[in-house]
Amino acid sequence: MKQADRTFPLPFFTINKNFTILTFSQEAEKLCGTPASLLEVFEDGSLEKVKKWVTPELHKAALEVHLKPVAEEVEPLTVDLYVTWDNDLYAQALIIPKDDKLTKVTKTLNQLRGRLNDTNFELLDEKEKLENAISQNNRLSAPFIRLTEDTALIPLFGELTQEKMQAVEDNLFKSSQNDDIDRMLFDFTAVGEMNREGIRVLTNMMTSLFYMGAEIVIIGVKPKQVKVLHEMVIPSQIRFMNSLQQAIHKYCVE
């Protein structure tokens, strides 16, 4: 096992089909140390999910998993794991830690849901807190991750609803302007169902960002999603790329 020759802005591993780590980036070492196997970095509750989805037969996978607590941390770290197999023997694995705010909101959301299941006391008050948490969770469902001085990643998660897209719209506009970003990568790898009204809001948002001067790149669109996107009116200059790894290699490594 050796450190990767190239410098990646995110934790990155090369593994074989037995999950043995062959190379790793500096960011991966900072986050996970130097384990011999990729399975060693995940919490027990995530191992079955990793074994099920990280396999050459699937070629590509995107899943939410939990890393073992790092350093003085008590709670496991929630991350998104992206895996692409070069062939039946070797794969590239990229880890993107969840935004701290999103992790905290998700934890609060789960706690509130548990309490509502256990008791009916102060139900209206707890219901209001839950709705606020869901609203904030929607706002953080498309986090703004700055990869380089001029490039930002916006990974999209779950179902793309109108309410969720409207919730993230203001944050993306403000972040792109405040951070002086020239290029925005919208990653559809972890997207589930695509609500047409939600896609309409998203495509209008991307069109506005494009006309404000940002280069827009759409990543990881599945075949069934392409038809929905093409029904929307978006500038022809907006680019499409197959995977996040490909985009990072082009815009962040080269």
Image (cartoon, rainbow, N blue to C red):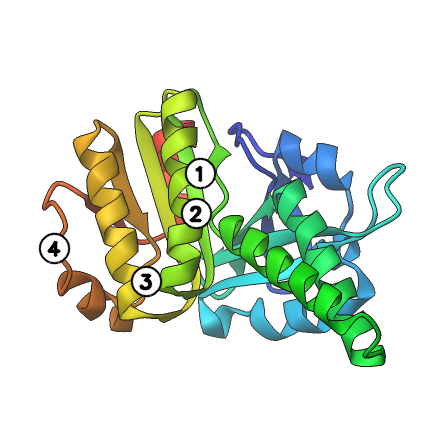
Per the model, the C-alpha gap separating discs 4 and 1 is 23 Å
> Which residue type does callout 4 highlight?
Val
Q: Is residue 38 left or right of residue 254?
A: right
The residue carrying mark 1 is 171
Residue 181, horizontal then vertical, whole percent: 36, 25
| Rendered position, 66 above or below 253 | below
Amino acid type of the residue tagged 1 in the rendering: Asn
Q: Residues within 10 Å of mark 4 (few under 14, many from 20)?
A: few
Of marks 3 and 4, which one's residue comes earlier in the chain? 3
- Of the image marks 3 and 2, the number of the one nearer the N terminus: 2
* Numbered label attached to residue 168: 2
Task: Tell me whether circle 4 and circle 1 mark residues in contact (CB < 8 Å).
Answer: no
201 and 126: which one is in front? 126
**For numbered disc 3, what is the local secondary structure?**
helix
- Residue receiving disc 3: 198
Q: Quadrant of residue 192?
A: bottom left
Q: How busy is the neighbourhood of tag 3: few (under 14 within 10 Å), some, or many (20 plus)? A: some
- Amino acid carrying label 2: it is Val
SS under mark 1: helix
Q: Secondary structure at mark 4?
A: loop
Quadrant occupied by the C terminus: top left
The residue sitting at 51% across, 29% down in the picture is 6
Q: Is residue 46 visible?
A: no
Q: CA distance from mark 4 to mark 2?
A: 20 Å
Reading the image, the residue beneath label 4 is 233
Provide the secondary structure element on which disc 2 rests.
helix
Residue at image coords 62%, 75% = 52
The amino acid sitting under disc 3 is Gly
